Image (tube, rainbow, N blue to C red):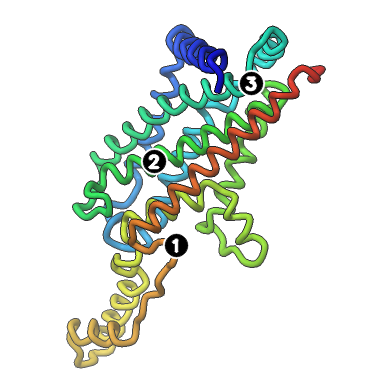
Amino acid sequence: MGASRIKQVGIYVGKHFRLFKNEKGWKTIVFAAIISLLISSVISDKLFTYDMSCWTGFFALVSACIWIGIFNSIQTICKERAIIKREHRTGLHISSYVISHLIYQAVICLVEALLLVAITAIFLPYPDYALLGSSYIEYFISYFLITYAADVLGLAVSSLVKSPATAMTIMPFVLIVQLLFSGVLFTLNGPMQYMADLTISKWGLNATCTSADYNGLESTEKVEMQYKFYEIVEDNNIPLSRDQIDELVDENFEKETNKNYLYTTENLMKQWGILLLHCAVYAAISIISLEFVDKDKR
């Protein structure tokens, strides 16, 4: 990047932070804190105990990160489109403009991820085990990458649409796609599995469940089976103790290993890498879209 491009990045980063101060951009951070508080208050405290609680709990947290990230940026570029068009004609480098947004939004997402970890830690006992030494650091990185990927997706959408009103109309559809193809609400088969690969939600869920050692958690299905047998034995006066029932269930129950959630550093790095790839693709879309801003008649 040439000196003029670097200088423009610095100028626009400063502009973004001035707007943050003057236009009360801190409201997005307050919004993120409220969402984090609401989600944390309803997630089961068995998040790190049972696999199904882990799966659904992190689905809620990942969804919150995506919602927060998109909300950060969905109107950012489209509301400045006329200004971008005018300044591009006088020497603005589109790549510098987008990179300045990436830097600014990264700072916002870092603060929001830190808030999410801090707020969830009030309600949830984060585990002592961690692939990278600290579970707080691991989840902070995952929350940041998920939020940031969604944020950059919001920038991409904002660079493509006509107005802030259109952006807000599209946002629910973007969120619905993330929810539907996460693999949690519905079982995905055939081509739909490939659609899931294009979502932030899938890779965010993979990352968080990997850190939680999903495959090593107690099976919710197994526990439900045990209690069902307890009731049958008690109702029919069958001479079996709970320990004997547990042994029978252990012998006949085998938990399926989810390869996406393998508890290895390599797997976690893979999930993080793919989230970063999403960021790069969305950033490229933003730059390519805005390169044609001079031809825009809007």
Residue at 25%, 41% in the rendered image: 121
Q: Is 11 located above or below residue 122 in the figure?
A: above
Query: Marks 2 and 3, Cα distance to the nearest angstrom?
Result: 28 Å
Q: Is 14 located above or below residue 221 in the figure?
A: above
Q: Is 225 located above or below residue 59 in the figure?
A: below
Residue at 45%, 62% in the rendered image: 260
Query: Marks 1 and 2, Cα distance to the nearest angstrom?
Result: 18 Å
Residue 21 at x, y percent in the picture: 43, 10
Q: How dense is the environment of label 1, judged by Cα within 10 Å: few (below 14), some, or many (20 and up)?
A: some
Q: Mark 2: which amino acid?
A: Tyr
* Residue 235, quarter of the rendered image: bottom left
Q: Which residue is mark 2?
A: 143
Residue 25 at x, y percent in the picture: 46, 16
Q: Which residue is mark 3?
A: 94
The answer to whether residue 274 is left or right of residue 137 is right
User: Which of the two labelled residues, at mark 2 and mark 3, occupies the earlier sequence position?
Assistant: 3
Q: Which residue is mark 1?
A: 260
Residue 252: image tag: none
